[in-house]
Image: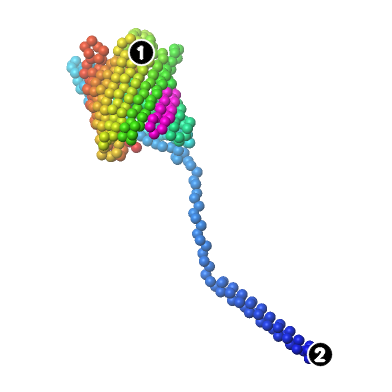
Amino acid sequence: MQQVKVETRKSVNKQGGVMKRSMVGLLAGIVISGTAWAQTPATPAPASAPVAVTMPKTWVDYLTMKGDVRLRYETINDDSKKNSQKENYTRDRARIRARLGAEAKIEDLKAGIRLSTGGADPVSGNQTLGDGFTKKDFRLDLAYIDYSFLGDSPQEIRAIGGKMEQPLITMPDDLAWDSDLTPEGLAAKARFGNDFVTLLLNGEALWVQERDAKKNATGLNGQVALKFQFMPEVGLTVGGNYLAYQNLEGYDVIDWENKNNSYGNSTINGSVSGNTTNKAWATEFTPIMGFAQLDLWLGFPVAIFGQALTNPKADANKNGYMGGVSLGKAKNPKTFEIGYSYAKLEKDATLGMFTDSDRWGGGTDGKGSKFYAKYQILKNLQACATFFLDQKKISAADGGTDYNRLQLDLQASF
């Protein structure tokens, strides 16, 4: 019995030694592995992607500025005017037009203003040079609010108010409107359609003259047009509009120069101011107009256009028409454009104070041809030459007098 106990103790002691040696080896392995891991250079963590920081928008982000400067030399032969020796004479003058505008757009709302040279003249921004280097006037030319009800949709419904750019579709050499005119009042524009046909609807409520003790002079204008795109090279726009002025007949004419000028329209005696009897309009003006423009691509752009109108309120001299063609488009550098048009506008066909101020000297009661050529020198620099071969006062018994005008322009835009 005693011998068995001794052997058992030896066996236990032997097993305990083995366990101790195993534990020591395990701990040594852990320590060695840990030391090696600690001495191994750490692998850098992959760099995180840069975080985009959105800066808050300022008023500059909503604002767009643009403008232009035009230099013009012109010579005018007007046989209805005589010099001090009662002889026909030629007027030569240099003129400038400068415009600077700013427009802010926030979501669907736009608001803008523009300043222009030209004094109070509603149909011209020109200022004549050569008056002893006097300073030239800048006046408010645009001040408007424009809201789009459909946002960025290809369809369009807009409301505009203030002193605005012409919201109507106008023709080259338009019979009723000078291109520099910025009407005042309210307007609405709508456009609906697809790639083949587009319906265009435009309307204006015009505030022509506020009168203190008499009815205000106003106007309502409605326009509808269809634009067809038969193929990329062929497009046609046809339309018409009805313009109804109110409270003009029998009222003193409106003349920004205060020279009692009716701009071609028939007049009767109006109010009396001292020794001066003012002119008053002899008729109302409600011209009905139709227009069309055919656009073609024949290796270069071609446009053929025409317009006609009649004033049913007038008893005579109440019609007008215009037709023309343009070849090319002076838009990209080193591109040309040439054009021709013929127009005739009888005495009471429309309100003369808003018509083209260059054609036969402005107003109504004239006819004649316009020739022009443009060349785009640089992206923002264009040269143009225009010649008018006209007759004015064509309702006179002698058939009127000759009026010729040459204009040479250089215009930079930005």
Residue 321 or residue 88, whichever sits in front: 321
Residue 280 or residue 25, whichever sits in front: 25
Provide residue 28's location: percent of width, then percent of height: 62, 78
Residue 52 or residue 252, whichever sits in front: 52
The quarter of the picture where the C terminus appears is: top left
Q: Is residue 196 magenta?
A: yes
Provide residue 389's location: percent of width, then percent of height: 22, 22
Residue 270 vertical placement versus 353 (above, below): above
Q: Mark 1 points at which residue?
A: 312
Residue ID at (33%, 35%): 232
Disc 1 marks a residue whose amino acid type is: Pro
The residue range painted magenta reads: 179-203
Main secondary structure found in the magenta portion: strand
Q: Between label 1 and label 2, give the one nearer the viewer.
A: 2
Residue ID at (28%, 27%): 304
Counting other residues with Cα less than 10 Å from the Cα at mark 1, is it few (<14), some (14-19), or many (20 or more)?
some
Disc 2 marks a residue whose amino acid type is: Met
